[in-house]
Image (spheres, helix red, strand yellow):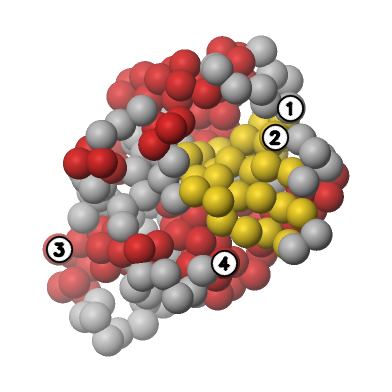
Amino acid sequence: MTSLYLIRHGETDWNKTRRIQGRSDIPLNETGRRQALRAAAQLAGHHWDHIVASPLSRARETAQIIAHELGLAEPIVIPELVERNYGQAEGLTRTELDARFPEEAAVPGRESRFEVAGRAIPALIALGEEFTNGSVLAVTHGGLIRSVLMALQPEDGLHHTEPITNGSVHTLRYDNAGLTLVGFDDVSFAGRKKSDIRRQNAVERREATT
């Protein structure tokens, strides 16, 4: 059995101003770096074998900070863990998104959640097979994490609407039964109250259902 822990990167200025990031390579801000240090401190009481990351700088830097604090090797970049492509929605606030693309309108260039899961899940399974019996940290993005969780448990509405906050940890297991969800927003690692977990970018509420 391999344990996989999906971690959302720390905050960026676009997170702070509630803009959709997608593939736009927006770096961490100082709050995001502090969040990465805090995440490392909360993860320090456990054994970790490897850490991997999306190629986008906000995820790579979060992973590098965590790796340094935990004494792990340089994070391995996994291209398939890159954030969902939001097409022409990138850079927009929710108000701007609603004005430009009404609920029923397709956003040009936006990757579907099915497409995101279709590239991310095989990559996670490959990690599970490569690091058998290990514990792997994977620093990635909110859109990708949600797409994976919705694909693994499509009947569970929690994963469709509950915010995925910066620095949150989501626990998966890979074994003979395949890839399964063990813990959504695992507060044993996050170190936050349930009320804190509910706060996130307003755009998540709409993007969660598309």
Residue 19 position within the rendered picture, expressed as x and y whole percent measured from the top left: 27, 51
Mark 4 or mark 2: name the one nearer the start of the chain: 2
Crowding near the residue tagged with mark 1, few <14, some 14–19, many ≥20 C-alpha atoms within 10 Å: few
Q: Read off the residue under disc 2.
A: 135
Q: 139 or 42: which is nearer to us? A: 42
Label 1 residue SS: loop
What's the residue type where badge 4 is placed? Leu
Residue type highlighted by circle 3: Thr
Q: Position of residue 183 (x, y in %)?
A: 49, 48
Within-10-Å neighbours for mark 3: few <14, some 14–19, many 20+: few
Q: Amino acid at mark 1?
A: Asp
Q: Which residue is mark 4?
A: 152
Residue identified by numbered label 3: 95
Q: Are the residues at dot 1 and dot 2 in contact (C-beta closer than 8 Å)?
A: yes
Label 4 and label 3: CA atoms lie apart by 31 Å
Mark 1 / mark 2, whichever is N-terminal: 1
- Per the image, the residue denoted by label 1 is 49
Q: Is residue 45 left or right of residue 88?
A: right
> Could you give the CA–CA distance between mark 4 and mark 2, rounded to whole angstroms?
20 Å
